[in-house]
Image (tube, coloured by chain):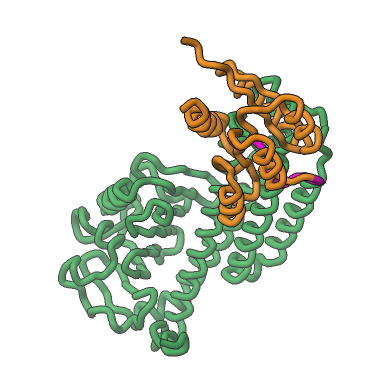
Amino acid sequence: MEEQKLRIMVIDDENIVGKRLKPALEKTGDIVETFEEGKTALSRFDEEPFDIVVTDIRMEKINGIEILERILSKSSRTKVIIITGYATVEVAREALSKGAFDFIAKPFKPDDLRAIIARASKELRS
Amino acid sequence: MRILEKLKIITYREPGIRDFCIQTIRFRTLLENARALLALVEDGNEKVIGEYILDRHYVTSLIDDVVARLGMMVYDACVLAPEYGKLFYMQHDRHKRRAAELNSQEKTSGKKNTAGDAAVSSDPEYELLSDVLTWLNGEASEPGATVIDFMKQVFVHVIKKLDANNDSKIGLLIKNNVSKTVDCNMFLIDLWEDAIALPARPHSLEDINSIPLKLLLMDVQGGNLSPMAGDKARAVTWIAALSEYRLSLRTMEPGCNFHLETTVSGHERSDFIFIFADPSINTENILPPGFHTEITDHGQLAWKLDATPKAIEDSLISIGRHLS
């Protein structure tokens, strides 16, 4: 039986991240929408929830931790994955303690993120 | 124990020997900084292929890390060869200016990069990374124009200076004060302890508490080591500064400079072999496979990094065999 497509939201203020992640993640047939700032992304989430949100941690106006909190308050089943170029133990600990599914440090290969998404997907369907 | 109590470990009877060991330790710091610089270049080369998700922060961090590490290298080099200080700092300033230009490069330059596919070339972050790699290791329009070429220049100047020192006063001091291993015509100095603490004449490899030297001598055939082979073969004098995991080995003959630095600790990230050989030495007969080599006007630089501990050990045994 064909698996249901995942709805994945990518939020990063660096244009290159969404531009490169979208085709890479769509290869598995999932639906991917990209955003460069949190406000628009959260509005879109209100219209239609996503299974997985991949968000950068350092962004102007709304940062990744705030996005994590607001997404989980809207949909506790959504898996939030944090991406950051400033990976520190503290950042990881804070994100995970606030309910992030996992985190990944830039630069990374799309396959590394896909592996995390696959784990998230498995949890969502269990 | 207080640090002052530890200082007696490098208190040598002869100031020349102490200076030699301090110089050797500083040279190894220079090598460590060079290794870190090479690792940054390698990381950039791996990322520019286009398989990674990266952002501008990665590229600007790379630039900043290179400048910082280059500064450390230049500092080490100026300590070792102060007469080249002005030249080193002028070149370093030029690289700092280039780094600042790259850091301020506009996000949308519209240039093509060397990464290959169209998607990659349209991303300004990849364009910038490509430009950074050209600055690091592209074609050098003039000596020292790229970071790697500058690094090679620094090494050649420093090694020439060290060899000049060895040929003169330190060589004489060592010949007069340090024990001699008759079998291989090599003078030994404990890098960290008092030179006179070494046995006057090691009777077996077990008397030498230095893994790399043991490996180097393990398969030596005959009584002498020499980097010169065939018609040019002649006896040379060596000086080896030792510690348990480190070896700094140099010839002390004018016109026959062979310099080997190695760490053999069993840890891939710290182990390496570095060699400088002047043009009179044919390293093809000495170097086992797997060395990166760079030719300069003054001689050949060769190194093996990021190899397994076994590969480093085997290489040292092989080098020793080919030097004998």
Q: Provide the major secondary structure of the magenta segment.
A: loop
Rendering quarter of residue B197: bottom left
Task: Report the chain shown in orange.
Answer: A
Q: From the top left corner, tell me how far across and down residue B305 is, in percent.
A: 43, 48
Name the residue at 32% across, 50% down: B309
Q: Is residue B24 rendered to the left or right of residue B138?
A: left
Rendering quarter of residue B289: top left
Residue B135 in sight here: no
Q: From the top left corner, tell me how far across and down residue B156 is, in percent.
A: 56, 56
Depth order, front residue of B23/A66: A66
Depth order, front residue of B319/A106: A106
Name the residue at 76% across, 26% down: A47
Vertical order, B257 against A100 (above or below): below
Residue lying at the far top of the rendered structure:
A1
Depth order, front residue of B312/B79: B312
Q: From the top left corner, tell me how far across and down residue B165 is, in percent.
A: 50, 72
Residue B100 in sight here: yes
Magenta-highlighted residues: A54-61
Q: From the top left corner, tell me how far across and down residue A93 is, in percent.
A: 56, 53
Q: Is residue B240 rendered to the left or right of residue B44?
A: left
Name the residue at 37% across, 70% down: B241
Name the residue at 68% across, 31% down: A10
Task: Report the chain shown in green.
Answer: B
Vertical order, B53 against A26 (above or below): below
